[in-house]
Amino acid sequence: MYNRNNTIYREDIQKIVGAIAVASSNKGVFITTSSYSDGARKYAENLNGNTTIILIDGIELAKYIYDFNLGMQSDQILEIKKLDNDFWDKLQDAISK
């Protein structure tokens, strides 16, 4: 059952590593809407050999969704302008000469 407070532990990562090995692959991505325990993160970071596991937790997933506009539509885009002081200073200098 879904619960954003569920934590992914080292044992969960070990299962994925085993599945990757059975699939004759050496790379995997584990995405969760919750979080990883310190042990799970350390295990994934310190895998020996050619196996690489990328861990994406709920916070990182939300950032990717936001940064890449996944499942989003723009409602309104605002343009904020500010004066270019250098331009106006140069114009004033040119007029003053």
Image: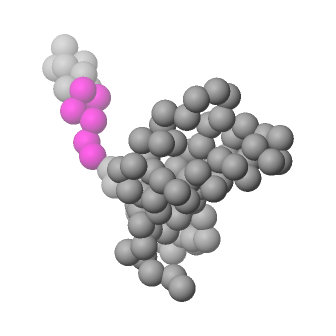
Left or right of 89, for residue 36: right
Colour pattern of the rendering = one colour
Image quadrant for the N terminus? bottom right
Check if residue 85 falls in the magenta segment: yes
Counting from the top left corner in percent of width and height, residue 78 is at 41, 63
Left or right of 90, for residue 79: right
Work out which residue is located at the far left of the displayed protein and give it.
96
Observer able to see residue 26 = yes
Rendered position, 6 above or below 49? below
In this view, the residue in front, 57 or 10, is 10
Counting from the top left corner in percent of width and height, residue 62 is at 46, 63
Counting from the top left corner in percent of width and height, residue 76 is at 48, 71
Left or right of 41, for residue 16: right
Residue 73 occupies quadrant: bottom right
Rendered position, 35 above or below 55? below
Which residue lies at the image location 51% right of the left edge and 82% below the top edge? 2
The stretch in magenta equals: 82-88
In this view, the residue in front, 28 or 68, is 28
Which residue lies at the image location 66% right of the left edge and 35% below the top edge? 51
Which residue lies at the image location 78% right of the left edge and 40% below the top edge? 25
Observer able to see residue 68 = no
Counting from the top left corner in percent of width and height, residue 21 is at 75, 43
Residue 59 occupies quadrant: bottom left
Which residue lies at the image location 57% right of the left edge and 71% below the top edge? 72
In this view, the residue in front, 91 or 85, is 85
Rendered position, 21 above or below 37? above
